[in-house]
Amino acid sequence: MSGLAEIRNQVMWNRLISVVEEQALTLLRTAFSTSVREAGDLSAGVFNPVGQMLAQAVTGTPGHVNTMAEAVSNFLAEIPRDQMFEGDCYVTNDPWKGTGHLHDITMVAPSFRDGELVAFFACTAHVVDVGGRGFGADGKSVFEEGIQIPIMKFAERGQVNRDLINILRANVREPNQVIGDFYSLSACNEVGHRRLIAMMDEAGLSDLDTLGDFIFSRSRRATLERVAELPRGVWDNRMTVDGYDDAIELAVRLTIREGEVNADFTGTGATSKWGINCPLIYTKAYACYAIKCVVAPGIPNNAASLEPFTVTSPVNVLNAQRPAPVSLRHVMGHLVPDLVLGAMARALPGRIMAEGAAALWNIHISARPVAGQEGRRSEVLMFNSGGTGARPTLDGLAATAFPSGVHTMPIEATEHTGPIVIWRKELRPDSGGAGRTRGGLGQIIEIAPAEGHEFEFSAMFDRVNHPARGRDGGQDGAAGSVTLDDGTVMKPKGWQHVPAGRRLILKAPGGGGFGAPEQRDKDAVQRDLIAGYVSDKPK
């Protein structure tokens, strides 16, 4: 390939990434759910005609993007090519063929140019409700957790499936929000299609084959070069996490060999009877993300750059089989990167960050007026984050979602969606583990029903009994806690009640420290004291 052709393909690659970024921004602008609109809990990408991911939007979460990379092939296996038409849009929320639980909707749309299939666009988003028990860990099977949509057509030749819309409206608590998000997802793919066709027309491309070959060959070569720089060997790591009733042991064996990095989860605890199980498609997504963060963070995400990273597991809580309950699969899934990074730290000592809060401190609130009073009923989903682990040369980030990457929702947007009042939301002093570099701080959030209301809430919290561990001599981060303002201790998982007049107090966990605390720079200690991040100098 000539130098000019290489430059042209690189420009077109960047243009393709901008196409899917505009696709994702369409979803952000049009979504009904605050989890999408305010937190960015979504993904968007473009795929070649055989279902290989060419490019993903930077906007979005690893759990959505990397599951979507596999999910598109599941769609192609279900819908024959001769049944695909211009104006089609396909949908599912199957946890094992989509993104791991029923609350995530995945939509795929074929993109035709002059009657020829040139690409697929795909996107995912978390919707506020799918019926059933609601967003929580209390279900004993996936059948209790909400409506299941098999891979099917949301629209054919531009005509929306009205039967599907009517079934959804009859099965969810917030039909306008949910159905609005379905249309938003469809619009997201349509915008991607229009921008792609405009790009191809402008560049004179009849297909994406040559560009795809360029993207894959460069990505594969660059990733394999990074893998070749790693030490060869096998490294193990274990982590104890809260679970539901009982603690769960997570285990990984990381094998680095020529051209491959494999994470195997043999030794992990058994499938739970509660809805904290994780389908393997979601475990793969976050395991590969953790490896890629270390090995090849600067290489764009696509089928070829993910190819050298593989995941295996027997049946367990990280490879749950249908019909296991999986509503809170994100809790175990978000802990997978810390587990994998712990093994990477043995392979690459001194280079890997400490453990952090990891799992989002999501809370789903079902608010209602007190009996006998007028008021609003509403479903409210709020995303919150603890602190990240300290890095070898930098402090951890306070109240930041790693590995999910979602934004913390603004208080104003959350209060607007339902009759609740957020009385306090602030950083939590002394929650970051001490070390040469300090762990990121958690946060304190105080939530109450609005006057004349009460609410049920679904707790989805971890690191309450097993805080984030420090690394290389760094101290552990502070554990999280869930209480009422009168001191009543609440469970870290499950649906619970907050009566009128009471406040729920969440203290999100902090990240672990890195290196011995006595090695911390004196100026850094002084800055922490002045900022109120710590209340005293480390002992």
Image (tube, grey):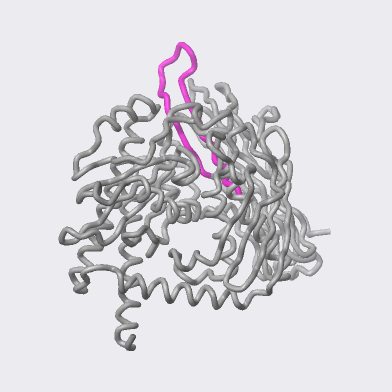
On the image, the x and y values in percent for residue 257 come to 64, 70
- Write the residue at 20% across / 51% down: 86
On the image, the x and y values in percent for residue 45 come to 37, 58
- Write the residue at 79% across / 63% down: 473
Query: Along the horizontal axis of the image, is 168 left or right of 433?
Result: left
Residue lying at the far top in this picture: please name it: 372
Task: Decide if residue 319 is in sight here.
Answer: yes
The relative height of residue 318 versus residue 473 in the rendered view (above or below) is above
Task: Decide if residue 532 is in sight here.
Answer: no
Along the viewing direction, whichever of 535 and 18 lies nearer the viewer: 18
Q: Is residue 381 magenta?
A: yes
Along the viewing direction, whichever of 147 and 351 lies nearer the viewer: 147
Quarter of the image with the N terminus in it: bottom left
On the image, the x and y values in percent for residue 189 come to 29, 52
The relative height of residue 206 versus residue 538 in the rendered view (above or below) is below
The relative height of residue 252 versus residue 106 in the rendered view (above or below) is below
Along the viewing direction, whichever of 44 and 370 lies nearer the viewer: 44
Quarter where residue 412 is shown = top left
What residue range appears in magenta? Answer: 359-383
- Write the residue at 72% across / 50% down: 239
Quarter of the image with the C terminus in it: bottom right
Q: Is residue 108 magenta?
A: no
Quarter where residue 9 is shown = bottom left
